[in-house]
Image (cartoon, rainbow, N blue to C red):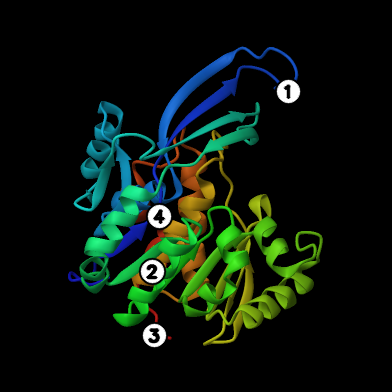
Amino acid sequence: MTAQSNATVFGTVFIDCKGFPFQAYIPTGRNLGRIQFVHGGVGRNIAENIGNMKLPVRLVSSVDATGLGQEVLDRLEACGVDTSYMAKADEAGMGMWMAVLDEYGDLAGSISQMPDLTAMEGTLTNQGDAIVRSSSHILLEVDLNEELSSEVMRLAAKHNKPVYGIPGNLDIVLKKPELLSRMACFICNHVEAERLLGRSYIDLDNNGRLEAIRALAQKLQLPQLVITLGAEGSVYYDKTTNECGAQDIYPVSVVDSSGAGDAFFSGTVAGLMQGLSLRNAVVYGTKVAGWTIESQENNCKTLHDKLQHDSLIRSLTVPVQV
């Protein structure tokens, strides 16, 4: 990433209410434990991750015009995130996510309340052209709504800006799969990949997974595609180099697995923005996801220091010409 680079994230802000049981979680019983409110949302998580890596980034989203909304903005700004284009709404400017983690730190159940995207739509209508024109890379939570996603993609094509996409709930992608063909890279999990493929993915052996990701990338006309597999790592395909491979996870002490997918996306895209090959960028993303899983929040606040002192990451940071 050069000094002139400036990534822009288009995505949502949520406040997460998380429950952590002290013992084995019983879905139909009473569970004593700890309840914590943390800042979340796919777009917000990604922006904070990029900021915590000390890379220039701004977030286009909305928050409530309340003290809690201001708290979200203050935290982002403390991480170096530009919040100039964060709209404030009287209500429902940000969503809510209620989640219960099991005794292993894995998600046991959740309910989401989506934000009202009207304020964000106003920002895109009035300032979207200037925002995209002044950005070097666009990071898009694809499933905002059809109008928002399509307009971001239109502006990115107009100004020739690469777009890196992550699905929120996949509904928009399933309705408008042509959006993906205009992206530089799309990163999704195996459940989302199965919906796009129309068949099982996780049950395939390694060769089957590599054949399937290549076929899916070709079907969707994607230059680069990454599918995450949870504890089994990830697989990736790069059409330009015709490289297709698998990446294992690194050992971690699981505290809270929520936010891991956003962290993987953040790290992988940060690697690509800095000139790494997709194979090496996926290593970058795997490391960032692992450090996030070891955190009690949706983000690891010490990403920059960890990246600076990790010998494997240091060996990858020489830009790779593709």
Name the mark nearer the viewer: 3 or 2.
2
Q: Examine the rendered structure and indicate whether residue 59 appears above or below residue 200.
A: above
The residue identified by callout 1 is: 27
Q: How far separated are the C-alphas under marks 3 and 2?
A: 31 Å
Under circle 1, the secondary element is loop
Label at residue 321 = 3
Q: Examine the rendered structure and indicate whether residue 136 appears above or below residue 81.
A: below
Image point (56%, 43%), residue name: 252
The residue identified by callout 2 is: 151
Where is residue 183? Give x, y as percent.
47, 75
Q: Earlier in the sequence, mark 2 or mark 4?
A: 2
Q: Are marks 4 and 1 in contact (CB under 8 Å)?
A: no
Amino acid bearing label 4: Asp
Where is residue 72? Give x, y as percent.
30, 36
The residue identified by callout 4 is: 310
Under circle 3, the secondary element is loop
Name the mark nearer the viewer: 4 or 1.
1
Crowd band around label 4 with a 10 angstrom C-alpha radius: few (<14), some (14–19), many (20+) = few
Q: How far separated are the C-alphas under marks 1 and 3?
A: 51 Å
Q: Is residue 319 visible?
A: no
Image point (54%, 87%), residue name: 241
